[in-house]
Image (cartoon, rainbow, N blue to C red):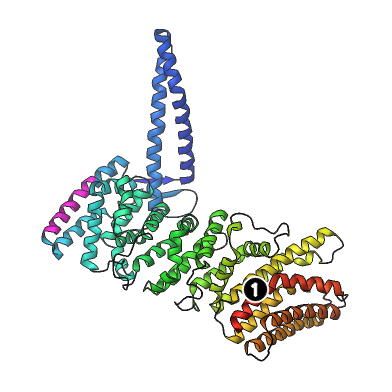
Amino acid sequence: MGEFVGIDPLGAEKLIRQMEAGKAVLGGVRPGLEAAIAEAGQEWTGRAGVTAMHRTWWFFHESQQDLRWRVDTLKRMVPTRQEGMLTATFPFSKDTEAARAAQKDAGPIIEALKQHHQHLSGQSWNEVEKALQALKGKIDDPAYAAALLTALGPQTFQKLIRDWMNTYAPGNRRGLTPDVLKSAGGSSPGLLAKAFASAESAGRLGNEWQKMVETAPSDILTSLVTLAPQSGSFLNRVATNLLNRPPNSDPADPNWNLHNLVKAYGANPEAFQRLLAEHPKEAGVLLDAYTVRTTGVPAYEEALAQALHGALKPGAGTDDLRERSWLTVINSIGSEDTFWVGGGLGTFSNSPISRTLAQDIKPILDHLARGQAKQNSPEMPHLEPRAPWHTLDPAVSARFMGALMQDPAAADTLMKAGQSYTKELDMGRFHPFDQSTYGQDAHVNLAERTGALANLLLAGSTYAEWSDDEYADRLANLMLMPVDYFDQYFPVASKVVATGKAQGVNEAKDILKDVITDYLDKKTPDTAEAVAGRLIDGQIAWLDESLRQHGQAPLTTSQMILIRNAMEGRLQSALLDALKRRGG
């Protein structure tokens, strides 16, 4: 029984496509040829060629089926991403042989289950397990797996898993715990889940198995997707169905179903990316702060963070799906009625989700900044974000930033990402008072985007629950972001000058921080508007003094007014809101 097989899956796929093209040519020729033969009657020559054409079509068709079966089986037996030749010893030589063996093996399983339902004893269940052990070494063959499941049927298939659960995990109707899942993996549920994955991923199961997603209990479905890597399409069908179901058990019980679903997504980032991009409503349930804090499973948040990293990290999947996935995450966490900020669930001050998102956010900062910049200066050309980012509300972006900033580590990561973004924009390429209109416009475009990002972070800071000292320190850093780039205009001839310049930035930060701290501590009668004005004045004063110290021409009065107005326009609204919320 069986044979040693070696195939290059990519080459085999190409050959299958070429044979399909050949079938299409033959299929297109056939009607006209048969009509011509009928019209010519006895005078038609070369009738044997028609038979050859039919045989060729069937040769292509049967070869495709056999090659497809071999490729599918090999991929299941050798789960690797390597390219080139893959080899394995198949349990069966033909798919028809595999199907016959499966039908034979299904009989004892069905009979043993029937006996178990009559006796409901440990001994009767052991007989079921013994019959199921015959599947080992065979279920990687999609033809075998499909024939086995067809013989069992969806109801018997579910009964086998349910009876195992009733025996080894009675009462766990909100999903299996990790320990129970580990035990299930080497027993009958694990074998059945692998058989299902083998048959379903090869497209060999009928509609009744697809409908099972709508009717099967949640714990059976989440066990299926956790015990074996199912296809992305099946995993997403399970998720969209489960996330629309009302609770059917005590909500106080730990919800291992959600945890197990997210763990399955951690192992299949491509499927999770597609869920986030194409099913924002259902994905929003997973991301909802209430869900995160009420699952009763502390490991859920970490599992969700890992799944998000797999789907959102730079370079993951396709650019389009990844960006649409980010939009779903931002809209969900930053929505107007979000519990991530200002809710009664407590702050996310030590959140792996916040830290993961802050870690992966850098490539999309420009899209967020452009959205805010366009709102700040709608008449300024070339600022608007491209699709799909043009649909994102800057207020949502700000709340999203604020949600992440509740975690100090995530806030620091966001700050560093913002500073890196500022440097990469390289505004020093264009001078704000360039003699050419193009240079001035280019500078304003870059400055608007930098100011807009600082604006978003400022707005987000209003939702962060930091100590007053932390708040003043971070706010001072944010205020300096739009002016840091002026360093690029100063010629640095020596380490002494460079050190002096760095010291000047630190001194400016200390001054701004003192202004903010005095306001928060009620040491000044100034209003938030007056404090905001002093902070912006401090930015301009630092810039002017730095220019003087480094031998540059000082700002003229008109230039100082122009820059101040620009700084004020980009920052004052968010700054005022931040000060008022924090200082009362």
Residue 504: x percent and y percent?
Answer: 77, 83
Asked if the stretch drawn in magenta spans residue 429, the answer is no
Regarding residue 358, the answer to whether it shows in the image is no
* The N terminus sits in image quarter: top left
Q: Main secondary structure of the magenta part?
A: helix
Residue hosting label 1 = 574
Which quadrant of the figure has residue 495?
bottom right
* The C terminus sits in image quarter: bottom right
Count of picture labels:
1
The residue range painted magenta reads: 103-118
Residue 424: x percent and y percent?
Answer: 70, 66
Closer to us: 92 or 110: 110
Closer to us: 431 or 492: 431
Is 137 placed left or right of 384 in the picture? left
Is 173 placed left or right of 34 in the picture? left
Residue found at the far top of this picture: 43
Residue found at the far left of this picture: 119
Q: Does residue 18 lie above or below 200 as drawn?
A: above
Closer to us: 6 or 95: 95
Residue 530: x percent and y percent?
Answer: 71, 82
Residue at horizontal 21 percent and vertical 49 percent from the top = 106
Residue 180: x percent and y percent?
Answer: 29, 68
Residue at horizontal 74 percent and vertical 62 percent from the top = 445
Q: The residue under label 1 is which amino acid type?
A: Ala
Using a 10 Å C-alpha cutoff, classify the residue at mark 1 as few (fewer than 14 neighbours), some (14 to 19) or many (20 or more): many
Regarding residue 258, the answer to whether it shows in the image is yes
Residue at horizontal 73 percent and vertical 57 percent from the top = 381
Q: Does residue 222 lie above or below 138 as drawn?
A: below
Disc 1 element: helix
Which quadrant of the figure has residue 326?
bottom right
Is 183 placed left or right of 548 in the picture? left
Closer to us: 573 or 481: 573
